[in-house]
């Protein structure tokens, strides 16, 4: 018989398509838990059967009532409760954060069994910069709210990651192309499943490819960061410095203008000294 798990909440990542991706530790945690909380019991029952887990299950999502959360919290003090979502990592565009927050606030232990996550898997496939990325989840479905959300992200100097359904990918790519122009992007579909694919191209090319041709399955859209802004020309720098030098010392004028025009301070200072002679 397997040992009991530590008491508290165990957040367990599960496969996003390929059941072989259930980690040994995730399977063991599900087997040893006293209770498994699932977004949809029917979906997770198959996974539990595969893991050989016989623990009772209960439904949990972020719409669960305060009273239900209180009942779960009461059990965390003396039992091990595992939380899974339908697929991937709980809390990532999935239920769980309210429960984790409440468990922490009540002083219970929270553990994680990390694993599959479609956003990270898509970033891994896309071949776009990964040093900085922003996970934006699902965009609003209404056109106006969607374009406002995209406009808000336009200046972010990072790769952007969106979740999307096959049915909406065409119109989302068109909205992204209209606001973000021709950035490099990727559409990752059915990751880890039989028909996995990752199509790359500019937003214009991808919008064209998926226009009126809704692909089947689950999708992640990855959009590369904006091109670095061109540095200000000497003429632009001189004009800004001449005006700043009417109020400030060369050093302070250089600092102010360098920050405003996004040029190296050293370049602005050398120019400021010349202009002030
Ligand atoms: N918690 C999950 C995770 O860790 O990725 C995400 C859950 S969210 C409700 C479901 C969305 O994730 C789908 O609409 C799709 O955008 C993305 N997704 C999940 N599995 C996927 C897969 N195998 N291939 C591509 N996208 C996937």
Image: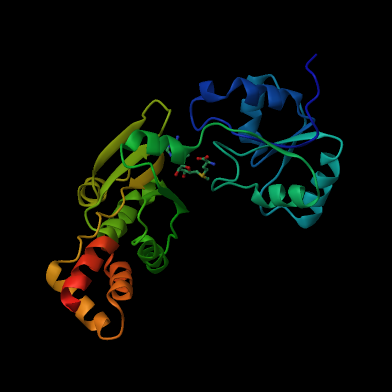
Asked whether residue 219 appears in the rendered view, the answer is yes
The spot of residue 92 in percent (x, y) is 55, 45
Name the residue furthest top: 1
Which residue is nearer to you in this view: 236 or 36? 236
Asked whether residue 54 appears in the rendered view, the answer is no
Left or right: 230 in relation to 9: left
Which residue is nearer to you in this view: 28 or 110? 110
In this rendering, the answer to whether 53 lies above or below 84 is above
Residue at image point 64% right, 26% down: 26
Left or right: 82 in relation to 141: right
In this rendering, the answer to whether 62 lies above or below 50 is below
Left or right: 128 in relation to 34: left
Number of labels in the image equals 0
Q: Residue 277: which quarter of the image?
A: bottom left
The spot of residue 170 in percent (x, y) is 30, 51
The spot of residue 74 in percent (x, y) is 85, 45
Residue at image point 25% right, 55% down: 228
Residue at image point 33% right, 32% down: 197
């Amino acid at each position: 018989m397997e040992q009991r798990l530590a008491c508290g909440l165990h957040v367990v990542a599960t496969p996003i398509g390929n059941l072989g991706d259930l980690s040994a530790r995730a399977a063991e945690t599900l087997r040893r838990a006293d209770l498994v909380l699932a977004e949809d019991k029917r979906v997770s029952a198959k996974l539990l059967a595969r893991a050989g887990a016989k623990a009772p299950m209960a439904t949990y999502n972020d719409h669960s009532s305060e009273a239900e959360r209180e009942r779960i919290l009461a059990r965390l003090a003396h039992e091990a409760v595992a939380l899974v979502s339908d697929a991937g990592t709980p809390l990532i565009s999935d239920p769980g954060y309210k429960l984790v927050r409440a468990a922490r606030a009540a002083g219970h232990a929270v553990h994680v069994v990390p694993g599959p996550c479609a956003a990270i898997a898509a970033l891994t496939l896309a071949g776009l910069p990964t040093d900085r990325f922003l996970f934006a989840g699902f965009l609003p479905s209404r056109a106006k709210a969607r374009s406002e959300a995209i406009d808000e992200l336009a200046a972010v100097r990072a790769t952007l990651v969106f979740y999307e359904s096959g049915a909406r990918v065409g119109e989302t790519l068109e909205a992204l192309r209209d606001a973000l122009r021709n950035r490099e992007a990727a559409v990752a579909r059915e990751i880890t499943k039989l028909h996995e694919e990752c199509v790359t191209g500019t937003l214009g090319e991808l919008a064209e490819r998926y226009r009126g041709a809704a692909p089947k399955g689950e999708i992640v859209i990855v959009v590369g960061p904006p091109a670095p802004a061109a540095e200000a020309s000497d003429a632009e720098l001189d004009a800004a410095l001449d005006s700043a030098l009417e109020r400030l010392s060369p050093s302070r004028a250089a600092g102010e203008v360098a920050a405003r025009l996004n040029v190296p301070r050293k370049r602005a200072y050398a120019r400021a000294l010349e202009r002030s002679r």
